Amino acid sequence: MKIYSFLDNGVSGSLGVIYPNGDYSWDPTPVRKKCLDYTKTKKFITRIDVTKFKELLTEKLIDVSKELKCGVILGLERPMVNPTRFNATRSALRALEASLIVIEELNIPYQYEDSKAWQAVMLPKGIVGADEQKKASLDVGKRLFPKGTFKTDADSLLAAEYLRKQDNRTL
């Protein structure tokens, strides 16, 4: 018995969780809006709210795993690192570092996963471009997890399902 979870990295990401009884949850990553950037020009950034993120992980993973006496598998999306998209890369890496601090503080085991791996298994073939990928993710997510409250995509829950399928394949 395991809890399968996946963190879609970033300030617009989410946490998808699949429980041993088949229940599931999807929650957006809690963020703090409009924090002043540390650069010389006036600019605002969005940051992960680590206090709320810790509460989310404790409620969805730690408390339930203790109650059910089961393990947790947490997949982390490998962050985008693209020199031509400096600001997006900086945001992704900043979000990953904040997430890792909380995850390690809670002693949650984790593993990195490439988005291409779970997408190849969970999404239809022939998807081209980010917009099509998000639409396909939302469509497949609503079909597989009809009670989900997804906003733009179901990436984290689909990736958690991918982890569950991969783990069951090795049993």
Image (cartoon, helix red, strand yellow):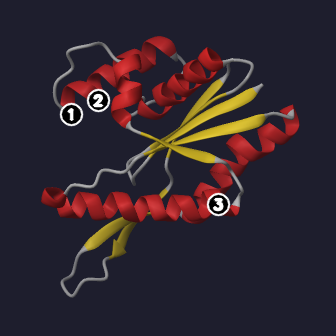
Residue 130's disc is 1
Q: Is residue 111 above or below residue 18?
A: below
Residue type at tag 1:
Ala
Q: Quick one: label 3 or label 1, which is nearer the N terminus? A: 3
At mark 2, the secondary structure is helix
Q: Is residue 154 above or below residue 77?
A: above
Q: Residues within 10 Å of mark 3 (few under 14, many from 20)?
A: few
Q: Which residue is tagged 2?
A: 134
Residue visible at 74% across and 19% down in the picture: 21
Labels 2 and 1 touching (C-beta < 8 A): yes
What is the spatial separation of the Cα atoms under label 3 and label 2, in whole angstroms? 29 Å
Q: Quadrant of the N terminus?
A: top right
Give the image location of residue 123, x and y in percent: 34, 18
Residue visible at 30% across and 13% down in the picture: 124
Labels 3 and 1 touching (C-beta < 8 A): no
At mark 1, the secondary structure is helix
Residue 41's disc is none
Furthest-left residue in this view: 84
Circle count: 3
Residue type at tag 2:
Lys
Residue type at tag 3:
Glu
Give the image location of residue 66, x and y in percent: 85, 41
* In this rendering, the label closer to the viewer, 3 or 1: 3
Residue visible at 44% across and 17% down in the picture: 142
Q: Is residue 34 left or right of residue 65?
A: left
Q: Quick one: label 3 or label 2, which is nearer the N terminus? A: 3
